Image (cartoon, rainbow, N blue to C red):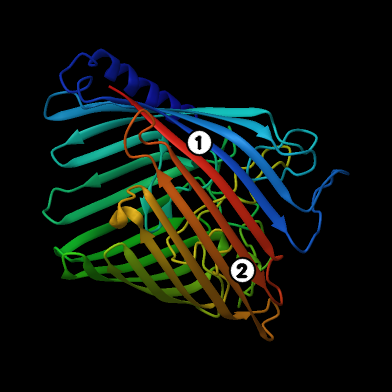
Amino acid sequence: MYKSSLALAVALGVLAQQAGAAGFVEDSKLSVSSRTMYFDNNNREAHASSSTNFERPDQRESGQGFKLDYISGFTEGTVGFGVDAQALWGIHLDGGRGYHKSGFMPDDSDGSSVSQWGRFGANAKARFSKTEAHFGSALAPALPILVSNDGRLLPQTFEGGMVTSKEIDNLTINAGQLTHAMGRASSNRTGLSVNGATADSNKFRYGGLDYKLTPDLTLQYYYSNLEDFYKQHFLGATHIFKIADDQSFKTDLRYFDSRSDGKNKDGGPGEYNFNNNGGYEKVDGKVDNKTWSAMFTYTLGGHAFLLGHQQVSDDGGFVWLNQGSVTDGNGNAEGAGGASFYLFTDSMINQFARAGTNTTFGQYSYDFARVGIPGLKTSVSYLRGDDIRNRSGNGTYNEWERDARIDYVIQEGTLKGLGASVRHGSYRGAGESPADQDQTRFIVNYTYAFK
C-alpha cells in the first residue's frame, strides 16, 4: 500500500507542475452523478442468517449515492500525462430495522446499516502515440476476463495498472496487473479472491487482443491469472450481419477454460480451496471448468429478439474474481462482495454458473423511439437451467429466472439526462438451488457535466 500510494503521489506532483500545459486543462471533464435506489429482495423461503435477534428474512433498503468524476486531458509532448480522480459517497435513507443484509450497504457494529460511507480514488495516466497507461485506485475494467460491477449505489473499483494500445489498425491490445478491489458497498479495499474462499491474492494479471477482422467481425483472446487460485483462457467472436437499414442479425460466441493455479492446484482442505458457487466439484476446492455460450439477436426496427444457450462443464462451476468471502481483521465482510462476469447468464438474481448447468435463455426488448417516445425502453427475459449437478455428484436439478425492466431517460429540457428504471425479477429453484426469491429495484440516475 505504501509503495503504490507513494508512486501515485509522486506522479500527481509531476502532473501538478504541468497542469498549465495546453490540453491538460482544456480537455478536462468534470461531472457529478446522483443515484437513488430502492432495493427489495423477498426471500420466499424465509430464513434468517444473521446473529442479531431482530433479523428478518427479507431485505428492503433505500439509499442515495453520489459520484464526482474528474478526467483531465493530457499534457503536450511526445508523452502526455494526466490524472483522473473519483470521489464516492453513499447515504443510507431507510431500510427498517432488521431488513439490512450485507452487500447493499456496509454493516455497522450491531448488524444494521451504517448511516453513510465514502471513498476517494485517483489514477495517474500517460499517453504515447495510440497507447495509454493508467495506474491508481479508481480503475473500472470492462473486459471479458474482468467486469467492474455497477449494480448498486456505488461502483466497484480496482487498484493496479492497465495498458491499452491501438498502434496497429483494427487491433486493440489490453494488459495489466491488479492488486486490490474496493467493493461497491465498502469504504475500504480488500485483496483479490473468488466466491467461497477465505484467502486472498494481490496479483491478478491479464492480457488480451481484440481484432476487428472485418467491419462486422471481431475476434477476441484473453488470458488471466489470479495467483494461487486460477488461470483462465477466453475466446470470443462477434459478428453483425446487416440485413437492411433497420434490420440485423448478431452472433456472439464465448468460451472460457479455467484451471487451478499455485496453492489451489492440489484441492482438498485449505484456505485457497473453496466450494465455488456452492455446487459440485470433481476435486473438492479445485478449479476445473470449461464454459461455452452462444447468443443470437435479431433486430427489426425497435424490436430485438434474443435467443441463446450456455453449457457449464460437469467437473466444477465457472470461476470469476469476487471478494464475497474476504473479510477485514475483525471478520466482517464490509459489503465488499458482489461482482460481474462476462457470461450471458449474469442475471438480476442468479448466475446459472454451477457445474453441469445447461441454460437456455431468451429476451425481447423494444425501443419506443420508433413510435415517437425517445428514451423509453423495455425488456423481458427468461432463463432456464437444467442438469445442475448435486454437490454429492448424484443426481441433478433445475432452476429458472424471469426478469423484466422499464427504463426512461428525459431527452430534452431542464431535466435532460434524468433517468428512471424499474426492474423486477423472480427466481425459482429445486434441489440444492438457492432460496426462491422475488426482487424489485427502483433506480433514479442523473449526471451533470460541468462546462
Instruction: Give the residue furthest to the bottom.
Output: 395
**How many residues crowd around disc 2 within 10 Å: few (fewer than 14), some, or many (20 or more)?**
some
Task: Name the quadrant containing residue 270.
Answer: bottom right
Q: Please tell me whether mark 2 or mark 1 is closer to you in this view.
A: 1
Relative side of 417 to 259, left or right? left
List x then y, in percent, for residue 176. 34, 47
Against 348, residue 389 (above or below) is below
**How many residues crowd around disc 1 within 10 Å: few (fewer than 14), some, or many (20 or more)?**
many
Q: Amino acid at mark 2?
A: Gly
List x then y, in percent, for residue 335. 63, 42
- What element does badge 1 sit on? strand
Which residue, given by chain and number where applicable, does mark 2 sit on?
267
List x then y, in percent, for residue 223. 36, 61
Task: Name the quadrant containing residue 343.
Answer: bottom left
- What numbered label is drawn on residue 35? 1
Residue drawn at x 71%, y 65% is 435
Do we see residue 334 in this rendering?
A: no
